[in-house]
Image (cartoon, grey):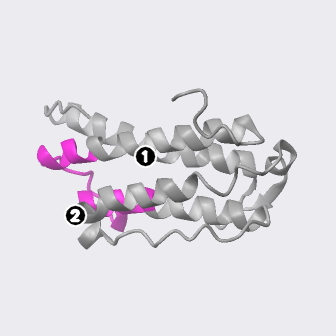
Amino acid sequence: MPVNELADYRYRGARALVLLHERALRDLIPAWRSAKAANVRLPQTTDPDYASLEALLYPPLRAARGYLTWLCEKLGLPDPGIDPAPEPDRVEREADRYVEHLLARWRLPLAGVEEAGFGATHKTRWGEDMSCEGMLEHAVMHPIRHRFQLEELLEAQGSRGNP
């Protein structure tokens, strides 16, 4: 990450988390493609997010949109205008385009927010109390956790991809 990338951010902590989120989401896609190419088998569960690899990719894309719309709402910022994530039946063919759209929209709204704004705690959509900075950290970790899971499945199933 160039030091001057997103240089207009008032709070460098938010800038760092936005850029780390971008990196994490970009790293998830090749890991997912490696798992797909290796025909990785997902654990047996009744969780619909594990019905297929396509179903597994959908939640982190949908959540990335939700994290930023929540942040904008809580910080009193305009809606960031992120399209809904492509559903599992379209996610494979639309993932690259969607990630570019999503990440471009992530770069915009938080730049003018002072550090103090990120400390306020709010109810998340799933009912927990979380600060805006905590939500940014959560957004970074979500795609990292999915990538880690896919890499472990690749290794366990003897299909070492290069995610």
The answer to whether residue 97 is seen in the rendering is yes
Q: Assess disc 1: are there few (<14), some (14-19) or many (≥20) residues with their C-alpha within 10 Å of its C-alpha.
A: many
Q: Nearer the viewer, residue 38 or 25?
A: 25
- Residue shown at 61%/60% (left/top)? 68
Residue 35, relative to residue 99: is it above or below? above
Residue 101: give x, y in percent of width and height: 43, 60
Residue 118: give x, y in percent of width and height: 79, 48
Residue 55: give x, y in percent of width and height: 31, 64
C-alpha separation, residue under disc 2 versus residue under disc 1 = 16 Å
Q: Which residue is mark 2?
A: 93
Q: Is residue 1 inside the magenta stretch?
A: no
35 to the left or right of 144: left
Q: Which residue is mark 1?
A: 25
- Residue shown at 69%/60% (left/top)? 71
Amino acid under label 1?
A: Leu
Q: Residue furthest top?
A: 3
Q: Which quadrant of the rendered structure holds the C terminus?
A: top left
Q: Is residue 45 inside the magenta stretch?
A: yes
The answer to whether residue 56 is seen in the rendering is no
125 to the left or right of 115: left
Residue interval drawn in magenta: 32-61
